[in-house]
Image (cartoon, rainbow, N blue to C red):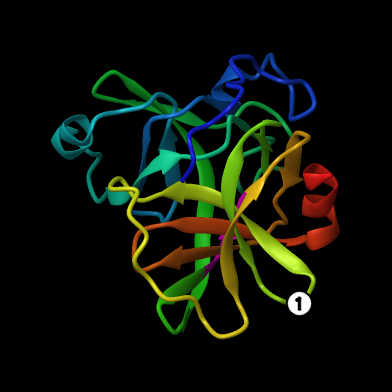
Amino acid sequence: MARRGLVISRLDPRLGNPEWTENWTVGPGLRFELIDSDGRVWLCHDPVTKEQALGLSLPNGAAPALLGRAIADVASFSRSPGAANDGPLDTMEVDGLRFSFVARPGDQRRVEEATILSVDKHHTLLYAAGRTIEVLDFGDGTFAAPAWSAPSRERGTSTPSGWERRDVHLRNDLIVVIPCPADVVIFDDGFGFHGPLPSSQLERALR
């Protein structure tokens, strides 16, 4: 994955309400998610080290769900799954770290060396102009934006027939509103993508 260009360091109102600070993640770093005994996914607001993530005293019945490097410059969730309206996310603390309820996974299926999860989440992300990012092209006029990279950042998985993982250089900000439910594609090399989104949206950011 190429080095990020312009780093966004603010809560961009194009993505959501800046007053709902618990709804946002900003900047790079390792991000940690846990899944609780009710199947709810909670995202840690701040970057963590691998050692921090492995050493957390998780709530009873909870387990690690994800440890990956953030790709978007800034992202916002408009509501927690099941909420009737947009608003501040449900939150909790674990060992002094703040977590927000951001997603609830549903059905999953395998396509060659990838797992596709149906995920209930309300997620908007910005990838800044000047960056090169990897996208997943489904070959049918849709694509998936990068969600996270593996901690090692090493790609090593073949792509299912008809799909293509490719690097693109952004000339303009790419802002994507992930559909709900989302298809979250997790490759066996640890990289994740979410969509599907119209390829025309990506092409506008490349011009």
Residue found at x 51% / y 40%: 71
The residue tagged 1 is 140
Q: Is residue 129 above or below residue 83?
A: above
Q: Position of residue 133 (x, y in %)?
A: 58, 46
Q: Residues within 10 Å of mark 1 (few under 14, many from 20)?
A: few
Q: Position of residue 39 (x, y in %)?
A: 42, 56
Name the quadrant of the C terminus.
top right
Quadrant of the image occupied by residue 74: top right
Magenta segment: does it hold 155?
no
Residue 56 in the figure: left or right of residue 204: left
Which amino acid type is marked by label 1? Answer: Asp
Residue 197 in the figure: left or right of residue 185: right
Q: Position of residue 124 (x, y in %)?
A: 69, 40
Quadrant of the image occupied by residue 182: bottom right
Mark 1 residue element: loop
Q: Is residue 75 above or below residue 121?
A: above
Residue found at x 61% / y 20%: 8
Q: Which residues are magenta?
A: 117-121
- Can residue 85 be seen by looking at this rendering? no
Q: Nearer the viewer, residue 104 or 6?
A: 6
Q: Nearer the viewer, residue 150 or 205?
A: 205
Residue found at x 70% / y 51%: 178
Residue found at x 34% / y 48%: 153
Q: Is residue 111 above or below residue 181?
A: below
Helix, strand or loop: magenta stretch: strand
- Can residue 27 be seen by looking at this rendering? yes
